[in-house]
Amino acid sequence: MTAKIITIERHILEQQRHFPEATGEFTYLLYDIALAAKIISREVSKAGLLEILGLTGEENVQGEQVMKLDVFANETMIRMNDHTGRLCAMASEENPDIIPIPERFPCGKYVLIFDPLDGSSNIDMNVSVGTIFSVHRKVSDGRRGALEDFLQPGYKQAAAGYIIYGSSTMMVYTSGQGVHGFTLDPSVGEFLLSHPNIQIPPRGKYYSTNEGNYHYWSEGVRRYVDYLKASDEASGRPYSGRYIGTLVADFHRNLLAGGIFMYPADTKDPQKPHGKLRLLYEAAPLAFIVEQAGGRASDGRQDIMNIQPESLHQRVPLFIGSRKDVDEAGQFIREFG
């Protein structure tokens, strides 16, 4: 029997039918993001040929060197979404402040938050990179977007997703109706449904973390990693260590196969007391996805989805993946610190 071919556009429209009051604005916003992903994917696949690898010589708001492809991805996301009338403002991991919609364009009722090219330091090594996005409904009173529209806890997200640019390009998203994955068929230029209703196993077999930072972690985190590496056939240990260094790629593998990704706080570096990853651009969107898939995301003590953001570029520790694994990590942190 031949499987049905379902494009991402058709899938989003079918999801919209569950909401009779929907105007289509949200649906087309998701399709705009998918179109931007196709453009970025095209450039990522031929980056070396276009000589756009390497650094621009500038630093972003995080103090990190900006890659040329970072700039392209950031500008593409902005250009594809600033004139549609679906957004009232945007925020990018690459920009220090919110990105207003130009006065000449109409404003909509959503805000878009994105990390345009996660893992960009891996581009020169031909390692998978990705884009992460989050959508919130406008809550401010003014016609244009305001900071309060972005500083909303994760459980208020209308949608979240990521695109991974690897051996194939995949887009995975949720709008609160499960998690669905689409693979880009370059021959027809469409994202086709390849992974419907993704469910993460309740317990995994992989742990993903940069163990070079082991001595900078708290005692509870160190003990938990030691526990994962200790042999215990009855409980399925030892776990296998798998760390790519691109959050999207590590998360994607664990979402499909089960496991836990960890980026703990740094107890020795006063510049990183709250971890490295950004709450709005990375942790909250992936938390929404993993919870919709049956998993969990925590900062070690509370659910990521419940954290009230205090600033646009706030950082948090992140423990994300299979529910039982994340719960277990939390137990070690509560007991040992």
Image: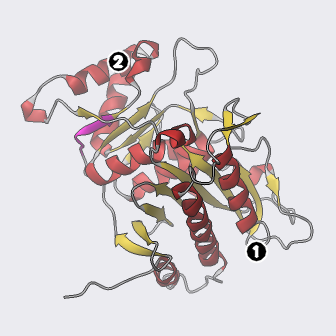
Give the Cα distance between marks 1 and 2.
48 Å
Percent of width and height locating residue 34: 56, 69
Q: Which residue is mark 2?
A: 222
Colour mode of the rendering? secondary structure
Q: Residues within 10 Å of mark 1 (few under 14, many from 20)?
A: some
Residue at 79% across, 59% down: 140
Is residue 178 shown above or below 324? below
Could you tell me which secondary element the residue under label 2 belongs to?
helix
Amino acid on which the number 1 mark rests in the picture: Thr
Amino acid on which the number 2 mark rests in the picture: Arg
Q: Are marks 1 and 2 in contact (CB under 8 Å)?
A: no
Camera-side residue: 191 or 41?
41
Q: Which residue is mark 1?
A: 84
Q: Is residue 167 left or right of residue 103?
A: left
Report the quarter where the N terminus lies.
bottom left
Decide which of tag 1 and tag 2 comes sooner along the chain.
1
Percent of width and height locating residue 25: 67, 78
**205 magenta-colored:** yes
